[in-house]
Image (cartoon, rainbow, N blue to C red):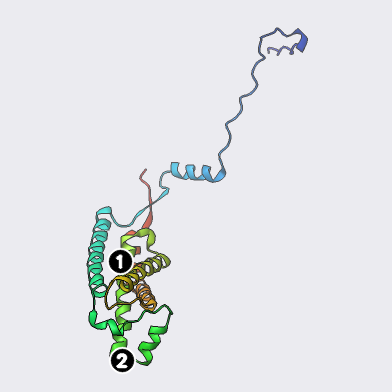
Amino acid sequence: MARTLPRLPAALRIPGKREPAGPARSAPRLPAALRRSRKAEAQPGSPVVRHALPLPVRLLAMLVAFACMVAFAVVLARLTLQPSPASVPLTHSNLHPGRSLNAYLEQGQFRDTVKQIGGNLLLGVPFGVLVPVLAPRARGVLRVLGLTALVMLMVELAQGALVTGRAFDIDDVILNTAGALLGWLLLGRRLGHGVHRRVQRPSAE
């Protein structure tokens, strides 16, 4: 068996001559989480997240929801932004939450109360139903309510500033937002989840 020669002292080594390289260093190890992720991707049959419905079906549902939203916007504009000169002496702006609701309940007739409160609730329902289908990232209840409140607040501001016979009423915004919550609970949550739901399926080998 061949013997390994002993290393020469530093003073007797030939200048410029390199010593045999030591064992090669191993590449730095990846973090454990990344190693597991890559290992799972490499293994056949690992779960892959995909949409439950095919793309054409999801696009059709969003197109129908968009058409309904446009139609609702036209109806909303006609109901809220149409001038009413005869109502000028009766309109008063309300910046205090609950004041108009109390007036409806205490002074108004039952029919007028149902018309005012129920009508404002119904105006918010389409937001709770259609927004989760149109905007997957905004289908959560807080975002739906925030978007509804913002839109209806702008409508009320336009009423008070630009439309004859209309006034700003914060209670209308509250009722509209409550209607959006009702629509989300009854139908919007299920529609948004059904259209944009994702499932885990085994990847093809």
Q: Residue 91 in the image: x percent, y percent?
A: 32, 82
Residue 85 visible in the displayed image:
yes
* Three-letter residue code for mark 2: Phe
Q: Quadrant of residue 115?
A: bottom left
Quarter of the figure with the C terminus:
top left
Q: Residue at x 37, y 65 (%)?
A: 147
Q: Which numbered marker is on residue 110?
A: 2
Q: How many marks?
A: 2
Is label 1 in contact with label 2 (beta carbons under 8 Å)?
A: no
- Residue farthest toward the front in the current orientation of the protein: 89
Q: Check disc 1 and report its element: helix, strand or loop.
A: helix
Residue in front for this viewpoint, 61 or 51: 61
Image check: 182 left or right of 35? left
Query: Relative to residue 89, is residue 54 depicted above or below?
Result: above
Q: Residue at x 37, y 79 (%)?
A: 93
Residue in front for this viewpoint, 58 or 131: 131
Q: Residue 126 in the image: x percent, y percent?
A: 29, 70
Tell me the residue that label 1 is attached to: 130
Which of the two discs, 1 and 2, labels the residue nearer the N terminus? 2
